[in-house]
Amino acid sequence: MEWFWIILGIVLCVVAIAGSVLPLLPGPPIAYIGLLLQQLRIEKPFTTHFLIFWFAIVVVSLLLDYLIPIWGTKKFGGTKYGVWGCTLGFIAAFWLGPWGVIIGPLLGAFIGEMIAQNNSTKAMRAAFGSFVGFLLGSFLKLVVCFFMLYYVIASI
């Protein structure tokens, strides 16, 4: 039965890595479940402090995944309109799958900046910032999931 938990934990971590780039799968929480399943083994590989620490990292990574595109929009010169557009674009397009999560914030930030009477060059720059933020958020989730995969494999 012990190998069942090990294999299931590894499979969940691999699915989580895919979920880090596919928006419909919440990558870090799935990988965290893979860590938790290791505790069902006869010899428990992780301490309670370790699991709480990784739970906190998962929560922070989820929050940052929503906040980093907004930060990217601001960093690339976006106004409040661009930030709101990025946020609303993400919410509106999240349900459209992977392309929706990429295009929604980008298009939302662009439209928001155009509403704010900015020229299209500045609006496109703010929209590009939201895309950069999306990429940074995805990278962060990948790093978190790869670390958890490492710990599941190292616990064998």
Image: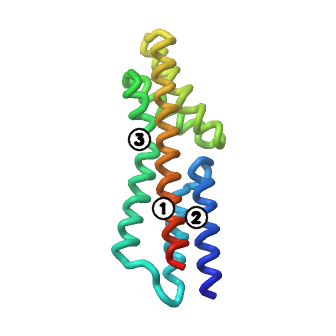
- Is 43 rendered above or below residue 114? below
How is the structure coloured here?
rainbow
Q: Dot 2, crowdedness within 10 Å: few (<14), some or many (≥20)? A: many
Query: Is 48 rendered above or below residue 88?
Result: below
What separation in Å lies between label 1 and label 3 (alpha carbons)?
22 Å
> What residue would you read off at disc 2?
13
Instruction: Give the crowd class for mark 3: few <14, some 14-19, many >=20 residues within 10 Å.
Output: some
- Between 6 and 27, the residue placed more toward the observer is 6
Marks 3 and 2 close (CB-CB < 8 Å):
no
Q: Nearer the viewer, mark 1 or mark 2?
A: 1
The residue pinned by badge 1 equals: 147
Horizontal and vertical percent for residue 42? Answer: 52, 90
Q: CA distance from mark 1 to mark 2?
A: 9 Å
Q: Is residue 144 above or below residue 125?
A: below
Badge 3 amino acid: Leu
- Quarter placement of the C terminus: bottom right
The residue under label 2 is which amino acid type? Cys
The image quarter containing residue 8 is bottom right
Residue occupying image coordinates x 43% and y 52%? 61
Residue 49 occupies quadrant? bottom left
Position of residue 46 in the picture relative to residue 99 (left or right): left
* Secondary-structure class at tag 2: helix
Residue nearest the observer in this picture, 84 or 10: 10
Residue 129 placed where, x, y %?
A: 46, 28
| Residue at numbered disc 3 | 67
Describe the element under mark 3 as helix, strand or loop.
Answer: helix
Instruction: Find the residue positioned furthest to the bottom.
Output: 42
Residue at image position (37%, 28%) is: 75
Give the CA distance from mark 3 to mark 2: 24 Å
Count up the numbered dots: 3
Q: Nearer the viewer, residue 10 or 27?
A: 10
Q: Earlier in the sequence, mark 3 or mark 2?
A: 2
